Image (spheres, helix red, strand yellow):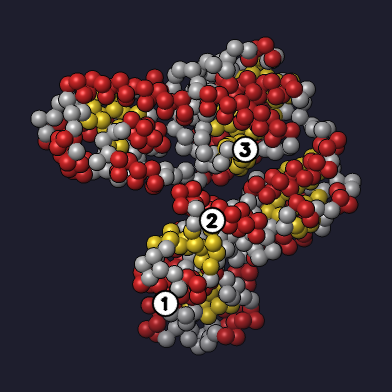
């Protein structure tokens, strides 16, 4: 039996952002309020409740004072913000950016049409949290319609401006729009404000449902999106079943099913779909052992990172343990195109776990960016009778893998290997811990000479687009200032800070600069400071590629080994187009499209820690 998890299922960006914000605060404070359930899934709500998240209604919210309250992705009406201000409530605003933009548009349209006694009409579900927030932008005067019958609530002789709840169907909105076009006697403006990331799930789930003999759809009973998607799923594949948890699975559903698809709503957590798969595997262990995958390839791509060899070792030996052939692909995607393969045995990966770099080599392939290049790569795989790939690298590696698996339906699983630690969907990437310790060791040595000569050092570390390495190394080394791409830093602010700290009472100064900081690299920033303050004895040190080298730390070796095993297991579970990562110490599966499109954020709490400790 083949089992596949829907790569497009699971939390949308807004829900992921809200949950991430809640978890960050709960790690530090163990208590947080949220207006309404953070997501329409009881199991996820219960999980966060155990961590300290308490759901409250608006009446309870109005009685709070001096507390922290999270506004979920659905958004809130203006009244909630006014109440928070009066009650000295700190808002943790996790409103979806798409919803916030829609609120602004409706508010503007309301003030414009109010002059002509016009009407704001919202196509949406009455009483839905998002709709309540939208209606709030019109002082409660917007007319909510759920279907064509509700159009009788509208005065067709007055101007009408139509908007839509972001999660409604395009087809439903089009029906309402056409009905208004044919009946309105005055000015009519129609704004299609449906979120396409959610709406596109309709055609995608149709395709997914048709691919399998049986569909298991996992969702909370309160989720309107879940009900909508399941109805579409059921029409595409009558052998579809709705469950809220794995315990609701019934064995008779699986009779004569050779292919099973597991999907869910935008409010369904990935871990719940994975638990559903585990439950199915437990009941159908013998059938699942008949995987169609017999030979896999493994490659490393992009910038090398300490621990890649440990990951290669884990992939090779896990494949052999499961009686699979395994092929090492030299020089990344370039080697895949050229057919630069070597069959690997267990002894081929002996004595490499402690080595930095990658025994398979790495290269950035321009040819793989083209349709022709990927076609050659596919032909090489077919010639070598290779059924699947494990790719180790960063977002560029995963972007290539995602396109490849879409074009040729090749199962590909990614392992995050980059010292930048900037991949969404995993707490840590392979190589980050080792690079961090390399930076700390170097800065500690530089601090010694800085103190001896009363010097101010600007030290540049890697991080073209992300400041994770700079921020953590800066805190760990007691840096006086940290400049990262995520935080707007002006030379004047840095100059003022140095005057208060370094110039005032310190005999040495360390400023950590991420190479991608918006103010420029270490040399640029140091030059600007030196021009204005020639009295500073300034030196610059660029650590460069030494951060990539060296023996991997114990943490990176264990992480790489864990993810190497998980990658092969995922392929044997017939999963594809996913990255295996580590979240809260557990293996997570994240679709490539999510880890590529979503940006991992640095923790504001770490920035605050540095501000406090660097005085």
The residue at the point 69 percent across, 48 percent down is 273
Residue 110, numbered circle: 1
Q: Quadrant of residue 277?
A: top right
Between marks 1 and 2 in the image, the one whose residue lies nearer the viewer:
2
Q: Is residue 373 above or below residue 34?
A: above
Report, in whole angstroms, how far the alpha carbon at label 1 lies from the one at label 2: 39 Å
- Pointer 2 local density, CA inside 10 Å: few below 14, some 14–19, many at least 20: some
Does residue 387 appear in this view? yes
Residue 292, numbered circle: none
The residue at the point 65 percent across, 47 percent down is 271
Q: Is residue 348 above or below residue 249?
A: above
Q: Quadrant of residue 585?
A: top right
The residue closer to the viewer here, 306 or 173, is: 306
Q: Is residue 487 above or below residue 298?
A: below
Indicate the secondary structure of the residue bearing disc 2: loop
Query: On the image, numbered disc 2 is attached to which residue?
Result: 52
Between marks 1 and 3 in the image, the one whose residue lies nearer the viewer:
3
Location of residue 6 in the rendering, given as x and y in whole percent from the top left corner = 68, 47
Q: Is residue 394 left or right of residue 515?
A: right
Query: On the image, numbered disc 3 is attached to which residue?
Result: 587
Indicate the secondary structure of the residue bearing disc 3: strand
Q: Earlier in the sequence, mark 1 or mark 3?
A: 1
Q: Is residue 246 left or right of residue 256?
A: left
The residue closer to the viewer here, 292 or 417, is: 417
Report, in whole angstroms, how far the alpha carbon at label 3 lies from the one at label 2: 23 Å
Q: Quadrant of residue 442?
A: top left
- Pointer 1 local density, CA inside 10 Å: few below 14, some 14–19, many at least 20: many
The residue at the point 59 percent across, 24 percent down is 311
Location of residue 29 in the rendering, given as x and y in whole percent from the top left corner = 46, 52
Location of residue 210 in the rendering, given as x and y in whole percent from the top left corner = 77, 50
């Amino acid at each position: 039996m083949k089992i596949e998890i829907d790569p497009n299922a699971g939390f949308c960006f807004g829900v992921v952002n809200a949950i991430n914000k809640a978890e960050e605060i709960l790690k530090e404070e163990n208590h947080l309020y949220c207006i309404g359930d953070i997501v329409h899934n009881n199991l996820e709500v219960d999980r966060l409740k155990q961590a300290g998240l308490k759901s409250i209604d608006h009446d309870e919210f109005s009685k709070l004072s001096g507390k922290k309250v999270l506004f979920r992705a659905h958004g809130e009406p203006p009244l909630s913000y006014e109440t928070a201000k009066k009650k000295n409530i700190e808002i943790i605003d996790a409103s979806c950016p798409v919803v916030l933009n829609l609120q602004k548009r409706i508010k503007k349209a309301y003030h414009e049409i109010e002059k002509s006694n016009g009407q704001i009409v919202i196509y949406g579900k009455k009483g839905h949290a998002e709709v309540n927030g939208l209606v709030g932008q019109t002082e409660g005067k917007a007319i909510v319609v759920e279907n064509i019958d509700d159009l009788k609530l509208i005065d067709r002789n007055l101007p009408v401006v139509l908007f839509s709840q972001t999660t409604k169907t395009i087809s439903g909105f089009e029906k309402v729009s056409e009905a208004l076009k044919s009946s309105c006697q005055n000015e009519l403006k129609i704004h299609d404000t449906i979120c396409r990331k959610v709406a596109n799930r309709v055609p995608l789930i149709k395709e997914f449902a048709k691919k399998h003999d049986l569909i298991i759809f996992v969702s909370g009973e309160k989720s309107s999106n879940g009900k909508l998607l399941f109805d579409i799923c059921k029409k595409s594949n009558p052998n579809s079943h709705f469950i809220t948890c794995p315990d609701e699975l019934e064995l008779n559903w699986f009779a004569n099913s050779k292919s099973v698809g597991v999907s869910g709503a935008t409010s369904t957590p990935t871990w719940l779909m994975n638990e559903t798969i585990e439950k199915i595997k437990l009941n159908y262990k013998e059938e699942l052992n008949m995987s169609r995958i017999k030979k896999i390839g493994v490659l490393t791509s992009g910038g090398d990172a300490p621990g890649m060899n440990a990951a290669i070792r884990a992939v090779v030996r896990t494949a052999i343990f499961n009686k699979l052939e395994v092929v090492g692909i030299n020089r990344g995607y370039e080697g895949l195109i050229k057919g630069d393969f070597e069959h690997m045995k267990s002894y081929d990966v002996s004595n490499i776990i402690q080595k930095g770099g990658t025994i398979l080599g790495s290269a950035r392939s321009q040819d793989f960016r083209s349709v022709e290049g990927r076609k050659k790569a596919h032909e090489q795989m077919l010639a070598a009778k290779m059924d699947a790939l494990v790719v180790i690298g960063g977002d560029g590696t995963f972007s290539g893998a995602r396109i490849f698996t879409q074009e040729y339906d090749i199962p590909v699983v990614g392992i995050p290997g980059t010292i930048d630690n900037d991949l969404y969907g995993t707490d840590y990437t392979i190589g980050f811990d080792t690079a961090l310790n390399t930076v700390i060791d170097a800065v500690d040595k530089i601090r010694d000479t800085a103190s001896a000569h009363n010097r101010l050092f600007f030290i540049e570390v890697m991080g073209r687009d992300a400041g994770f390495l700079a921020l953590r190394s800066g805190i760990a080394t007691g840096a006086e200032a940290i400049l990262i791409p995520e935080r707007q830093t002006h030379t004047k602010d840095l100059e003022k800070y140095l005057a208060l700290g370094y110039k005032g009472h310190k005999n040495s100064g360390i400023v950590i600069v991420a190479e991608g900081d918006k103010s420029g690299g270490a040399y640029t920033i140091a030059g600007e400071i030196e021009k204005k303050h020639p009295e500073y004895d300034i030196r610059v040190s660029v650590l460069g590629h030494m951060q990539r080298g060296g023996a991997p730390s114990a943490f990176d070796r264990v992480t790489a080994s864990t993810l190497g095993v998980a990658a092969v297991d995922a392929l044997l579970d017939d999963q594809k187009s996913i990255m295996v990562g580590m979240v809260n110490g557990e293996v997570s599966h994240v679709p490539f499209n999510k880890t590529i499109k979503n940006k991992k954020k640095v923790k504001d709490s770490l920035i605050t820690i540095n501000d406090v400790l660097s005085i």
